Amino acid sequence: MYLGLDLGTSGVKAMLIDGDQKIVGSANGSLDVSRPHSGWSEQEPAHWVRATEEAVAGLKAKHPKELAAVLGIGLSGQMHGATLVDATDKVLRPCILWNDTRSYVEAAALDADPRFRALTGNIVFPGFTAPKLAWVAKHEPDVFAKIAKVLLPKDYLRLWLTGEYISEMSDSAGTSWLDTGKRAWSSELLAATKLSEEQMPALVEGTEQAGKLRSELAAQWGISGDVVVAGGAGDNAASACGMGTVSDGAAFVSLGTSGVLFAANASYLPKPESAVHAFCHALPNTWHQMGVILSATDALNWHSGVTGKSAADLTGEVGETLKAPTGVTFLPYLSGERTPHNNAVIRGAFIGLEHESSRVVLTQAVLEGVAFAIRDNLEALRSAGTGISRVTAIGGGSRSRYWLASIATALGVPVDLPADGDFGAAFGAARLGLIAATGADPIAVCTPPVTAGTIEPVSALSGAYEDAYKRYRALYPAIKSLAH
């Protein structure tokens, strides 16, 4: 048996799989986020440990024999969090999370230093780890002076599980301290934030062994033998391992609260000015690129709140047969935008409204607006050297066939639908645990799910969609000067 532990923002998911990768069971432990000031987002690392204990206890209650047979554990986690510990492993302050924006001034200052984009291949976003440490140095100097190690959230869990300070490439690529092409810490970038390599964990690949489960925990969980803990992955790379998005050109589109277009790469292809993330993948000698839009299903949920109709009712009114765009355009920048604009203050808009613009027309425009935002991501990835010939759709928004037809037509590529199943980050983490424990070939393990169906672009509407996308593209520069 193999155990995947996924440390998310709202909880920890534990999943058991067997040697044939069949899911045996899963359980969860819950987490809350603390927001003591505007723009702040924090969690106590002790709560991650408690939630992990809850999740594993849930598995043990239902599957004690299977848990006892675990040989490998894989870790996945929310990225970018700054977990600071002193020389005795005591946590110095609550972890500053990925969605905390307090360090926007420090992020801009680091991003203005050309070495950061040159070595990391990415813009220094406020959510990344390095600017958070610059903020701590400025505002909490007593805390900064005591830092012995800076750990990402899942790697703090590893410290509790194994007693080791170890991280891996995919998560570390989101710190702004990793030389992403060389897959090594940059002493130059660390020095720019008054830190050293001694304060960083050791680095391994996500598929490699990265410690062994402490005997006390193994006894508590009912396990008698040695248990290997894999390097693991950041959450998106772990989901990609679960989806089998590991070979060059393989891609998925995730329609969750936010939207992600994720492509695996056989080489390192940075283009930071596009606001595409270029990170190491969890597998050796593999990288990935990722475009992110901040409001995908969130845009439909906003429209649902305004109209008083459920998201399912709204998409039901539009139907399943794709229609030509009406001339009403929606910009889904409800909380700013990441790729390709890197603009935190831009806001959304409906353009082209007329007396005949019904609720159905507005719903159609919302769905198209998100599809065009994802097309922006595709163009950004293409500009960075990545070609995508098809995508697999995951996330709650993928239940709408109309939306998927709109995305297929906007992107000009087929959209595959996976067969039912849980192929998320916990499953990907369990796969990494299996690889680390057995030495199995990562490509042979990280296979894609069976495709249940494919939605092709509607060629008869491709011209109308191209015209509508050109209108969409022209609107961002037109409204940019109005944002503040």
Image (cartoon, grey):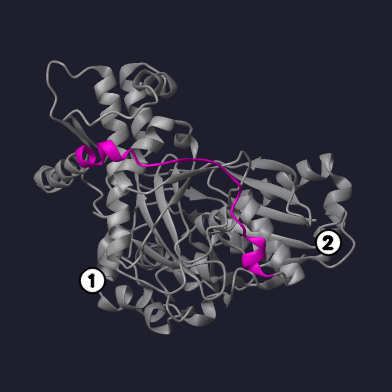
State the residue at coordinates (71%, 45%).
55
Q: Is residue 89 at all visible to an observer of this figure? A: no
Q: Position of residue 343 (x, y in %)?
A: 23, 52
Q: Position of residue 428 (x, y in %)?
A: 62, 56
Q: Which residues are magenta?
A: 441-465
**Which quarter of the rendering shows the C terminus?**
top left
Tell me how many marks there are. Answer: 2
Q: Secondary structure at mark 1?
A: loop
Name the residue type under label 1.
Answer: Ala
Q: Is residue 114 left or right of residue 414?
A: left
Q: Secondary structure at mark 2?
A: helix
Please say if 399 is above or below 450. above
Instruction: State how far apart marks 1 and 2 are (Cα).
Output: 48 Å
Foreground: 480 or 163? 480
Q: Position of residue 424 (x, y in %)?
A: 58, 48
Foreground: 179 or 284? 284
- Which mark is in front, 1 or 2? 1
State the residue at coordinates (27%, 69%).
111
Asked if residue 451 lies in the magenta stretch, the reply is: yes
Mark 2 nearby-residue class (10 Å; few <14, some 14–19, many ≥20) = few
Disc 1 marks which residue? Answer: 112
Q: Quadrant of residue 380?
A: bottom left
State the residue at coordinates (84%, 65%).
215
Asked if residue 159 lies in the magenta stretch, the reply is: no
Mark 1 nearby-residue class (10 Å; few <14, some 14–19, many ≥20) = few
Disc 2 marks which residue? Answer: 216
Foreground: 6 or 252? 252
**Which quarter of the rendering shows the N terminus?**
bottom right
Q: Position of residue 245 (x, y in %)?
A: 52, 58
